[in-house]
Image: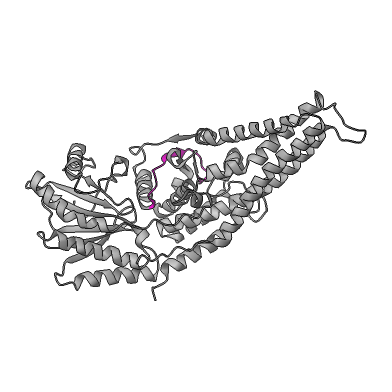
Amino acid sequence: MGFLDSLLGRSRPKQADLDALFLVPSAAITLQASLGLRPPGRGSVCYRAAGGAAFAQTEADILSLLRDAPDAPEVSTSHDEFGYTWLVVDDDPDDVAGLCTDLHAVNTTLEAQGFGPGLLCSLVPFEDAAGRRVGLVYLYKQGTFYPFAPQPGGQRQRDSLLEINLRETLTGELPVEQQTSRWLALWGAPGL
Amino acid sequence: MARTRFIGDAGLTARMTLVMFLLGALFVALVAVLMGVFAQSGSPGIALLVGVGGLGVVWWQWYSSDKVAMRAMGAREVSPEQAPELHGMIDRLCAMADMPKPRVGVSDTHVPNAFATGRSPDRAIVVVTTGILRTLDAEELEGVLAHELAHVAHRDVLVMTVASSAGILAGMLAQGSRYGMFFGGNRRDGNNALPVWLLVLLVSLVTYAISFLLLKVLSRYRELSADRAGAHLTMKPQALASALQKITGEINTIPDRDLRASKSMNAFFIAPAIKGVSLKTLTSTHPSLEQRLEQLAKIQAELGRPAG
């Protein structure tokens, strides 16, 4: 947003940056090779549902589009305490690229209907051999990724050391969010 | 192709630009007239000096806006541990809007209100009262926070402080010319000429009156802009609408003493906290509730319109 636009009070909603999501498959290979983290084949998109007929129609279109796809992934939606909707896609664990294509289909459909500014983040969880889960989160408006590692045990605490470790591993593969204040805590996100 | 459901308001932008231009012209005119007046008494440089001094005061008001406003409202900053829900909401809104996260404050006041202040988006602070936390549900509170974040993004503290510079200068002069009446002001040119201090007093009173009205107009336009940006950010205009209805209703049913105590902060509030002042009057800092609801209804219609 330009300085003049802000002085004149005519800021526009920020559009989402969609393409960086396709960097996830190569990052998944890196995570598996260096840290033993495997994707369980699940991914989710978190967005703000607008009121009214148009959004309900768009959401229904997305769900039927994904369910009718050749690989027919499991798709479900849920709502979190902050009023955002999580659309969860469950696909073949070995096909991260296919998962990203599914997530991208969600994004482009929302964007084509004018709901791109409502996209908040996308989450791809990873799991190690012991069942420990961490999330790779994509921020649509910043076009950057960050790691989110909750401490096991259900207390709302983050494993900062693991997160920093993941950041070092992923730098070079992905645009990583440098401002840690932007690393949203996504407690209770589906798949974590 | 990215479609947008954003509706701009070119008319509002044009009117806002005109008002800001007029306020700027007013400042220049005031200094020019003063130079003329002082030139008669032989020292036109004083007017320029007064002008620069006035700008210095304006700069200081802008620079220390966060501290002054916080102190005036008795607000304290809260950490993410102290107010996790509030911080979580603002975190998400800032991520959606791609703006730096402001600090968050809470003020122990029964008046349900919220304001944003600070000299720049990086130094901004968003404050809510305990009254508003009690009154609104989560969705409505988020609508209000989005409105305040829009004020931050629009640099409203900067705009309103600069816009008030003519008024501030005129106020200073009106004060100063009283002293002139006692000490100086004995230099007169010709027999019928008014004393310099009286001329200065008249000029500054007129300037103050004009600037006062223009500022209120500008403030109302800025509120409408913030409403629009906030509603687009949360994509829930109806939440902000019901919050506004609740707040304006509550404010009129709350005892007088609290309300007068927060009078100096009115321009920064989401809804004005003065009881009995008709919202439709010329001097209101906020647009009428009907006007705000009308704009929100338009945004709602656009967001809900099915694609052809």
Q: Position of residue B103 (x, y in %)?
A: 41, 39
Q: Nearer the viewer, residue B60 or B141?
A: B60
Which sits in the foreground, B196 or B235?
B196
Q: Is residue A58 magenta?
A: no
Q: Is residue A77 above or below residue B155?
A: below
The structure residue drawn at horizontal position 57% and vertical position 35%, both measured from the top left corner, is B59
Q: Nearer the viewer, residue B207 or A133?
A: B207
Q: How is the image coloured?
A: one colour
Q: For this view, does B303 lie left or right of residue A75?
A: right
Image spot of residue B40 (x, y percent): 82, 33
Q: Left or right: B224 with respect to B210?
A: left
Query: Does the segment drawn in magenta span residue B103?
Result: yes
Corner quadrant of residue A158: top left
Secondary structure mostly seen in magenta is loop
Which stretch is magenta? B97-114
Q: Is residue B114 left or right of residue A110?
A: right
What percent of the width, then of the height, locates residue A98?
16, 63
Foreground of the two, A46 or B167: B167
Residue A47 image offset from top left, x and y in percent: 31, 58
- Extreme-right residue of the structure: B191
Q: Does residue B276 appear in the picture of this structure? A: no
Res. B237 image quadrant: bottom left
The image quarter containing residue B85 is top left
The residue at the point 79 percent across, 33 percent down is B39
